[in-house]
Amino acid sequence: MMADDPIPTNDADPAGTTTAFDVAAAVRAGTVTAASLVERDLAAIAAREPELHAFNLVLADRARAEAAAVDALVAAGNDPGPLAGVTVALKDNMCTHGVLTTCSSKILEGWKPPYDATVVTRLRAAGAVVIGKTNLDEFAMGSSTENSAFGPTRNPHDPSRVPGGSSGGSAAAVAAGFSRVSLGSDTGGSIRQPAALCGVVGVKPTYGYVSRYGLVAFASSLDQIGPFTTTVADAALLLDVIGGHDPMDSTSIPQAQPSLLRAIEQDVEGLRVGRITDLPAGADDDVVERLELAFDALRDAGAKIVDVRVPAFSFGLTAYYLIAPAEASSNLARYDGVRYGLRIESPDTNAMYSATREAGFGEEVKRRIMLGTYALSAGYYDAYYGKALKVRRLIADDFDRAYQDADVLLTPASPSVAFPFGSKGDNPLAMYLCDVYTIPTNLAGHPGMSVPFGTGADGLPVGAQILAPALGEPQMFRAAAALERAMTKELAR
Ligand code: GLN
């Protein structure tokens, strides 16, 4: 069933993986059925999922039914939409109507949301097929997916290593060919860092670009949903579908966004690419080497490399670990055994709250709740939370100044390639440092993306991060497409 249905491959795709773009074109044209493509992905899942554990839940029957519905539309002469037959895996912190949504936490045990997240509604309306819910660090807190209550996800490139996190399952699913595309959430780097470690494209859009309605909140002022894909064009396609105003999210930007698919038709001639001269040190040599080649590639493609300074960049991590836990401590107060998931029966209500929270939350989540509660507590509020908000402002101001001279900035996405399991497990600070290059963007509310740019130590993927000002997605995608073209050329040599 799988091998009999060859579909055209995208020449721009170095790995030869079938893209969402090609799938949608073939399914819409009626040359391949969505049903056969779902079977192909389910076969890939059957072969490697036991080893990789990308999913908390594979929705085989639902996916088959959705694919059949897409095929029926095509057979009837209708257009299922721009993502016709494209399989998508959803990070398991996005609400799916009637389907378990766990956040990889024991505290949500048995919870089935009574509604779909807006992104899920939009994907389905565009003809996409939801194939499963992916593993994550509990409540999206972590950089390795080791904090999942259901066990870690493994990196498809080397199963002895982490896939990154917190959206490790979504990154691994796309890298392993379990689904054409996936969605993750990025609060401080949780899309871009796993994308880098798994060798796929990952995008954190401008805050408010994609609706957060139905995304289980971690730190509401930072959380954004975004795509994982094998190509830049697929990421553009996906964002064109899931982006745009949603009245259900009061922080959603109330204006239509220009097509990113259209944007990447334009090259980078004259685009100003900034090099942050005071970027915090700490990236491994192999990563720095690849980054230099990325600058060269953009210069060769016609971009202009300029030096910029973002002095407050290096304070990002510190500010984030006050602001994000503060918001988390408030958001996670709702899990008390009364309305959702787990309840540990106890003699009185207060005892029930604490027994439930003690049993339901993992160690890292408890650490964040304590950090956040402390940062917000009377007498410390100004010294910690209030100060962190001021630093956040400084970071945004510094970026704004840098973007007067540059259209986009280029940095590493992750300081290192994928690391072995357990290597940072007992050292929260070492884990937090994984996001040193991704966090400032979230604090500023700006977009960022990671594009695979070759390999570093042990042949493992390296990601180049492109940053842009608010709503700078079009130029960010243009730079990403240029890097992708350069990589295709490098691989052809
Ligand atoms: N790794 C960071 C953290 O643990 C970022 C997580 C995220 O973006 N969700 O908070």
Image (tube, grey):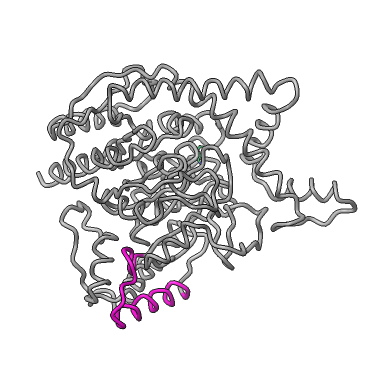
Q: Provide residue 194's location: percent of width, then percent of height.
A: 41, 44
291 or 227: which is nearer to us? 227
Residue visible at 50% across and 29% down?
A: 430
Q: Considering the image in quadrants, where does the N terminus appear?
A: bottom left
Q: In this view, does 158 lie above or below 5?
A: above
Decide if residue 416 is in sight here: yes
The quarter of the image holding the C terminus is top left
Which residue is at the far left? Answer: 493
Q: What stretch is highlighted in magenta?
A: 61-86
Residue 43, percent from left and from top: 36, 70
Q: Residue at x 29, y 48 (%)?
A: 260
Q: In which quarter of the image is residue 461?
A: top left
237 left or right, relative to 155: left
Q: Is residue 309 rendered magenta in the image?
A: no
Which residue appears farthest toward the front when viewing the image? 255
Judge whether 456 appears above or below 98 on screen. above
Give the camera-side residue of 251 and 326. Answer: 251
Q: Residue at x 60, y 28 (%)?
A: 322
Q: Can residue 434 be seen in this view?
A: no
Residue 66 forms part of the magenta stretch: yes
